[in-house]
Amino acid sequence: MSTATRSVETPANEPSKLVTTLKSSLQQLFVFAALIVVYIFFMIFANGFAAPSILPDILLRAAPIGIMALGATFVIATSGIDLSVGTGLSLAAVMTAWFLGSDFMGLPLPIGLLLALLFGGLIGLVNGLNISFLGLPPFIATLGMMLVARGLALVISDTRPMQIDAPGFRDLSTTTTIPGIPNAAIIFILLAVIAAVLLGKTLLGRYALAIGSNEEATRLSGVNVKVWKTLVYVTAGMFMAAGAILYAARTGVVQPAEGLGMELNVIAAVVIGGTSLAGGRANILGTVVGALLMQTLITGLQMMQVNQSWQFVVTGVIVLAAVFADNVRRSRAAAV
């Protein structure tokens, strides 16, 4: 066992681990408290927000963004970024319509959904190969994919809405198997559990965090960083496709340009939840709460009839505040 490994496991480091755990828990409580405060604020000041139908609607609309944010959590944990997640959703939704729509391939529902997930993984694979093996910066690689995905979505759909009329498809999102909770929210919770297991109990999650903490040290320890980083982007791509499926299932109609700009909400949900843009730290539960907080803000602002342009301003301010808070945390951790 190396000296570095022994130093991590010594009892002297237990207090620092405890402090880190407590700080993480406090941050989760703070984000959850912010969600409660924002929800109560809109109940008081937004006309109709207190209606019983609002909470299920927030859960329904938060699910696609939240699921995409789960995948983005792995990417950001490696200190990477994925700007293609919004237009990637558009392209994955268009391909879902192509696989399942009766006017197109008309495949059975399970096969069409599987192909859609694999297509999302393909988008992630291209991103991962460009970043890991071609050496492109994540910002540039995913920016290029954002433009490619947007163009392909418009070309394949011929810039027209595509209908998905496969039996049972809309039930994935809007049906309430559990009274008051749409199926999309249940799927979101199940995928969050899977993401938490992947992050905390598998090599994929451990290596993602290790790469984000110190990529060179991880490589020198014998880990094939290029392969594992590529797998992280493949995983994110499949989560993105799952979000696209639920997004399309909400109405059964795919608009090929709908996902543009959605990457802002996804990144905001991840950063608000406590995942560091510098890499090395990730929080799946925080991402879930962050997605709910973002959708609550969007819904509340819409019900208060705030102009959409100002909604973008609010989102941008929240992202800046979350990044600033992350920088403060890292500065304090470095000073200790």
Image: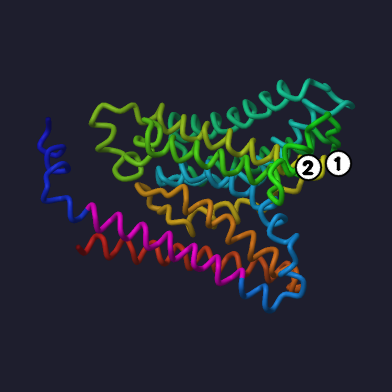
Q: Residue at position x 67%, y 63% from top?
A: 298
Q: Is residue 252 left or right of residue 297?
A: right
Rate crowding at label 2 as few (under 14), some (14 to 19) or many (20 or more) other CA atoms within 10 Å: many
Front residue of 239/263: it is 239
Q: Are marks 1 and 2 in contact (CB under 8 Å)?
A: yes
Residue 53: % across, % down: 75, 60
Where residue 189 sits, quadrant-wise, is top right
Give the residue at mark 2. 256
Question: Quarter holding the C terminus?
Answer: bottom left
Q: Residue at position x 67%, y 78% from top?
A: 44
Label 2, secondary structure: give it: loop
Q: Can you say whether 149 is above or below 262 in the image?
A: above
Q: How is the image coloured?
A: rainbow
Q: Disc 1 to disc 2, how far (Cα)?
A: 7 Å
Residue 232: % across, % down: 46, 34
Q: Is residue 174 left or right of residue 262?
A: right
37 in magenta: yes
Q: Residue at position x 55%, y 47% from top?
A: 69
Give the residue at mark 1. 161
234 in magenta: no
Label 1, secondary structure: give it: loop
Residue type indicated by callout 1 = Pro
Q: Earlier in the sequence, mark 1 or mark 2?
A: 1
Span shown in magenta: 17-39
Question: Quarter holding the N terminus?
Answer: top left
Residue 216: % across, % down: 28, 38
